[in-house]
Amino acid sequence: MHALNLQAKPLSLADRLADLAVDALIDEADLSPKPALVDRRGNGAHTDLHLGLMHASALSLWPAFKEMAEAAVEIGDVDSTLREAIGRIGREGEQSMLATTNGVNTHRGAIWALGLLVTAAALEPQSSSANAVSLRAARLALLDDRYAPKPLSHGAQVALRYGARGAREEAQLGFPSVLQRGLPQLKRSRANGHGEQNARLDALLAIMTDLADTCVLYRAGEEGLHAMQSGAQAVLDAGGSASLSGRRRLHELDQQLIALNASPGGAADLLAATLLLDRIERDGILQGAF
Ligand SMILES: CC(C)(COP(=O)(O)OP(=O)(O)OC[C@H]1O[C@@H](n2cnc3c(N)ncnc32)[C@H](O[C@H]2O[C@H](COP(=O)(O)OP(=O)(O)OP(=O)(O)O)[C@@H](O)[C@H]2O)[C@@H]1O)[C@@H](O)C(=O)NCCC(=O)NCCS
Ligand SMILES: Nc1ncnc2[nH]cnc12
């Protein structure tokens, strides 16, 4: 008879999805050098954020992601009941995040994007291609949540001022920045042998080339958005982050965006969404789960 049972307990589907979502957030935070964002080097354009806070915030969201996946398994359909359940869980997740960070908004957009994707993945774990999961997430994002407050958020202010589409529309359209920019670039850079960290940086840059990032618009207006989009394109045109000239352009972009106070927090969230979908697609979510 063994005194100790050292066999690991199998993870539930919801446990595994919550693990993958938190891993994606931590991988995004750690990736360096990201232009004007918090990373291993420093705080980018932020005075109230640092890497430890990003990690703590990511970890605080684990229960919310797990609860969203469990709601999907229990309710089993893309319908208003599920939409309103994850809206409530998402708002509670925001409160845990704010309690952990002393009121700093670290991951609001990420709770939205990754929350929808985790829910969509849990609904049909056998159908886990990036396309299929994003499509289900979009159907959920299109449903109304009667209990959602309608604050004049930074995103809402920017929509009024510039007519920009923000996080809500990105999800409702099925995450085009992830499916058409981030993921294809991640795969291309990997296939070119650029190494995982450079491939992830290139994926972030690809997202930045076209995104109406409402954080950038709020902080730095259209000048900031143009600098972000054209600067990211210039890095990719110069050969991407694995090349010397691309690397030089990347450092210039970092300095330019910091000078403009233009932090691409929305693009960072969408990189985390890209990494999550990539993991789900490559490893599956049933592996190791029961
Ligand atoms: C539908 C919601 C996403 C709310 O959207 P809305 O646009 O009204 O709200 P915002 O508060 O502005 O948050 C949107 C966050 O989404 C990220 N983002 C920005 N642009 C895009 C884009 N084009 N596509 C996708 N995602 C985008 C971004 O998040 C990151 O930036 C955060 C920091 O932003 P901000 O607070 O503006 O920060 P600072 O400028 O630094 O602030 P100061 O220091 O100046 O004060 C950071 O957290 C990143 O995550 C936007 O901030 C949705 O949130 C919602 O309805 N939630 C309710 C709950 C719910 O229903 N959940 C569903 C469960 S899944
Ligand atoms: N690495 C990062 N830096 C600043 N804001 C962010 N929002 C999400 N990830 C971020």
Image (cartoon, helix red, strand yellow):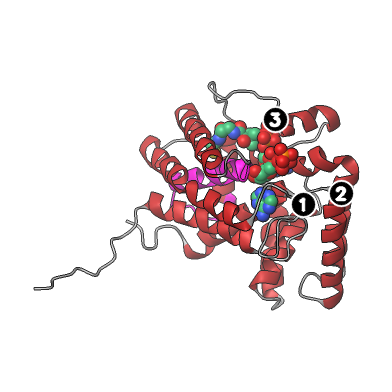
Amino acid type of the residue tagged 3 in the rendering: Ser
Which residue is at 56% across, 39% downward? 98
Q: Are the two marked residues, 2 and 1, in contact with CB atoms closer than 8 angstroms?
A: yes
Quadrant of the drawing holding the C terminus: bottom left
Residue at image mark 3:
153
Q: How many marks?
A: 3
Q: Quadrant of residue 244?
A: bottom right
Q: Disc 3, ligand 1: is the CB inside 8 Å?
A: yes
| Span of residues in magenta | 105-131
Residue at image mark 2:
260
The answer to whether 289 appears left or right of 197 in the picture is left
Amino acid type of the residue tagged 1 in the rendering: Ala
Q: Secondary structure at mark 3?
A: loop
Q: Secondary structure at mark 1?
A: loop
| Separation of marks 1 and 3 at Cα, in angstroms | 20 Å
Residue at image mark 1:
45
In the image, 274 versus 188, the foreground residue is 274
- Where residue 210 sits: x, y (%)? 80, 50
Mark 1 crowd level (few <14, some 14–19, many ≥20, 10 Å Cα): many
Look at the image and tell me whether residue 157 can be seen. Answer: yes
Q: Which mark sits nearer the N-terminus, 1 or 3?
A: 1
Amino acid type of the residue tagged 2 in the rendering: Leu
Which label lies toward us, 1 or 3? 1
- Where residue 206 sits: x, y (%)? 76, 58
Q: Secondary structure at mark 2?
A: helix
Q: Disc 1, ligand 2: is the CB inside 8 Å?
A: yes
Q: Are the two marked residues, 1 and 3, in contact with CB atoms closer than 8 angstroms?
A: no
Mark 2 crowd level (few <14, some 14–19, many ≥20, 10 Å Cα): some
Which residue is at 61% across, 54% downward? 272
- Where residue 178 sits: x, y (%)? 67, 52
